[in-house]
Image (cartoon, helix red, strand yellow):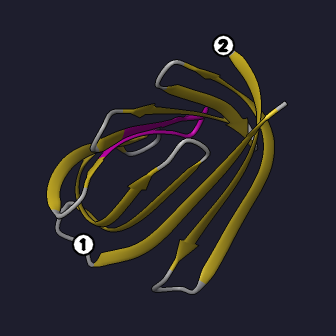
Amino acid sequence: MSKIKVNALLHNKKDDKFFNSDVTGIKSNNTIKYIDNDVVVVIRLDKDNISLKRRSDEYDIDMHFKENTLTEGKYNIKTLGFFNLKVFTSKLIIQDNKIEIEYEMQIEDNSKELFSYKIEMEEL
């Protein structure tokens, strides 16, 4: 288990909004965990796919990423209930200190949103 510095950048391409985080986290085997603005983020890495969980007082979201694959996830907005997610991952790069994901997400039958998610890590 090692302490890491995490720089995460999420780009909502439809709205052209950027969300940037510089936080301290923990990396243990194939798991990265950090807290970003009261949201607990847990990323589980495998050879060719990633599981992402985000937990807060307002919502829980579970997503899975595998390049060129449509996966299903869950979005629990605590005041509204559970929603099904469809996630298509067009790009997935997993390296020692860097993760890049480009994906399209659809909640239930609503319009699709395009995202780019980049995470860089540095051991402290």
Labels 2 and 1 touching (C-beta < 8 A): no
Q: Is residue 103 magenta?
A: no
Residue placed under numbered mark 1 in the picture = 110
Circle 2 residue:
1
Tell me: 100 left or right of 6: left
33 is higher (above) or lower (below) than 59? above
Task: State the separation of the CA atoms marked 2 and 1.
Answer: 40 Å
Q: Crowding at label 2, few (<14), some or many (≥20) Cα neighbours within 10 Å?
A: few
The residue depicted at 48 percent of the width and 70 percent of the height is 116
Amino acid on which disc 1 is placed: Asn
Which segment did they paint magenta? Answer: 51-64
Describe the element under mark 1 as helix, strand or loop: loop
Residue 70 bears which disc, if any? none
Q: Is residue 59 magenta?
A: yes
Name which residue lies at 18% across and 47% down. 72
Q: Where does the C terminus fall, quadrant-wise?
A: top right
Relative to 115, is 122 above or below? above
Asked if residue 82 can be seen in this view, the reply is: no
Indicate which disc, 2 or 1, sits on the residue closer to the N terminus.
Answer: 2
